[in-house]
Each structure stands twice: as C-alpha cells, then as structure tokens.
Image (cartoon, helix red, strand yellow):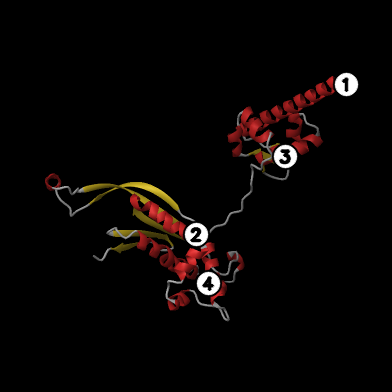
Amino acid sequence: MQGSLSQNGEKNNMSAESDNQVRAFKFIKAKFNSQELFTEEEFQRATGYSKVSFKTYSSKQFRGLMIPTDERHFRISAVFRQFSTWKKFKDKVVTQNRNFGRSYSQICYENVIVFEFYMPLRNEEYLRQTLDSLFYKDSVLFRLKLIKPSDLHKAFPKGDGEDEPQYFERICEFISDKFVGYSVNHVNGRYRATDIKTMQEALTSGAASAERYLVDETTAVVRFIFPCKAKPEKPESLVPPNEMRSAEPDANLIRWFFMQLFVQSILEVVNAEDEIWLLETGMRNRLHIWRAKD
C-alpha cells in the first residue's frame, strides 16, 4: 500500500513537471511569434513553477533561448525555430542541458587576402592530397628546407642568437597561425578551344576533325582567405598616429610563403595543364597565370 502511494506521488510529480514544461513551451512560442519582451517574473508565473524551481529549470533548459535586451527584459532567440513543436522542444530542450545561446564578440579585419585557384576537376584529388600534406609540420619543414637559405632569411629574418631549430619553429608558428584551411567549390564553365571563328567555320572544322570549338568543363575553385594584421595589435583609437603601421608587411609574408609552399607544390603535381590561374583579391586585385613553356 505504501509503495503504491509512493508510485502515485511520483507520477503526480512527473505530471505536474510536464505540465509546467508545456506551459513554458507555450509561453516561449507566444513570445517568439510576437517578439514581445518579457521579464523572468512573467515567465515564472506563466509556467506555474515556484521561484526556486523556475530558477533551476531556467538555468538548465531555457536560458539559451532567452536573449537579454536590458537589465530586466528578454526576448526569444531565433534559434527557437529549431524547436517550434512540443516534440522537438521536449526532446532537444527539456531533456538535454544545452547552451543554445552562445554569445559572440566581433573581430573585424580591415585587410584580407583571398587566393582562388582555378583547376579542371580531374586535378582535384591530387590538389587535395598536396594541400592536405601541408597541414602537417614535417611536410612544411620539408618544403621550407627546399628553399634557398638566403631567400628564406631575406623574407623571414632570423632573430638575434636564434639557432636553426628555433628559427624553423618560429616559421612554423607563423604558418600555423595563417594557413589553417581552404574551401573547394565546383563551377560549370565553357571556353573556346581555338581561335575565334564564324559559326559556319566552327561547324565545318568540327565535322572534319575531333577537335571541339566550344568545350564544357567543370572547374574546382580552391579558395584561401587570410586576415592580415597591422602591428601593433591595439584598437585604432588607442594607437598614437606615429605608431600606426600598415598591414602590408604581414600581407607580404603571407604572399611569399603561399607562393613558396602552396603554389610550388601545386605546380609540381598539376603539371599537365597549359595554364594555371590564381586570382588574388582583397588588398590587391590581380590575376597570376602560369603558362607551360613548351
């Protein structure tokens, strides 16, 4: 008898808790749809939770959905769209302790370099393998040691009393900070394979030989984005005018290492093309083209 009463009590508590959570869901959904501001006290009263219980559940379940607008008021985050039905809300919010509302601080780089390689899709696998190898320190060190020491020291001077291991470690730290990833897009293109002709000439020559006048090709565009930092790294308002420096030295180092490590590696692997294009945008807008000499 006593066990039966205990079980009934647990069921009643679970039912009450579930009812409070349904009320919380309805309140959140209503405030999201109206984008009306609310206070914690209003939310607590709507749920039927006691103040102590609401504080517990709010911190564990609902806080990530609430965005403060001032000291007392909140609005519902757009992330609630992911949990806009009771089932999703119950499965993802009520039963999990998750932070849906991470806060972010903005960083703005005034100077960036964007490099885009344009490659026929047939080269993508080799290209990825080559680029991925340069994510590893031993591969980077191998490529660095292929550069003439005088050229390397000119681009990246050694520090006073710095030995070779320390020097290469500092270079690797710079590369690790700058070269962290790339993205690949596929684009469909068409190009003219021979000198310009009339439509009739193109049809005639196409019928007489296997050479095509217009060629369709899927191109892999490999993109790198590099933020460039000006030194010293202080908010602009706090830096005296005579201390302001250009981001160009950082950009020049990025360009130099990019050419030495990435471009040279790519030219060695993808060497069957007549031309290889690299588009540079950002601080400078220019097109780099490597043409086969033969």
In terms of sequence position, does the residue under pointer 1 or pointer 2 come before the other? Answer: 1
- The correct choice, above or below, for 159 with respect to 224 in the image is below
Q: Quadrant of the C terminus?
A: bottom left
In terms of sequence position, does the residue under pointer 4 or pointer 2 come before the other? Answer: 2
> Label 1 near label 3: C-beta < 8 Å?
no
Q: Residue at x 47, y 77 (%)?
A: 153
Specify the label residue 135 is tagged with: 2
Residue type at the position of mark 3 = Lys
Residue type at the position of mark 4 = Phe
In terms of sequence position, does the residue under pointer 4 or pointer 1 come before the other? Answer: 1
Residue type at the position of mark 2 = Phe
Q: Residue at x 48, y 64 (%)?
A: 139
Q: Quadrant of the N terminus?
A: top right
Place of residue 243 in the rendered image (x, y in percent of width and height, measured from the top left): 57, 73
Q: In the shown orientation, is residue 209 left or right of residue 183?
A: left
Q: Nearer the viewer, residue 234 or 125?
A: 125
Q: CA distance from mark 2 to mark 3?
A: 39 Å
Q: Give the residue number, with chain letter if any, for mark 3.
A: 60
User: Crowding near pointer 1: few (<14 within 10 Å), some, many (20+)?
Assistant: few
Q: Give the residue number, with chain letter if any, for mark 1.
A: 2
User: Which secondary structure lies at badge 4?
Assistant: helix
Residue type at the position of mark 1 = Gln
Q: Give the residue number, with chain letter if any, for mark 4.
A: 168
Q: CA distance from mark 1 to mark 2?
A: 66 Å
Q: CA distance from mark 4 to mark 2?
A: 16 Å
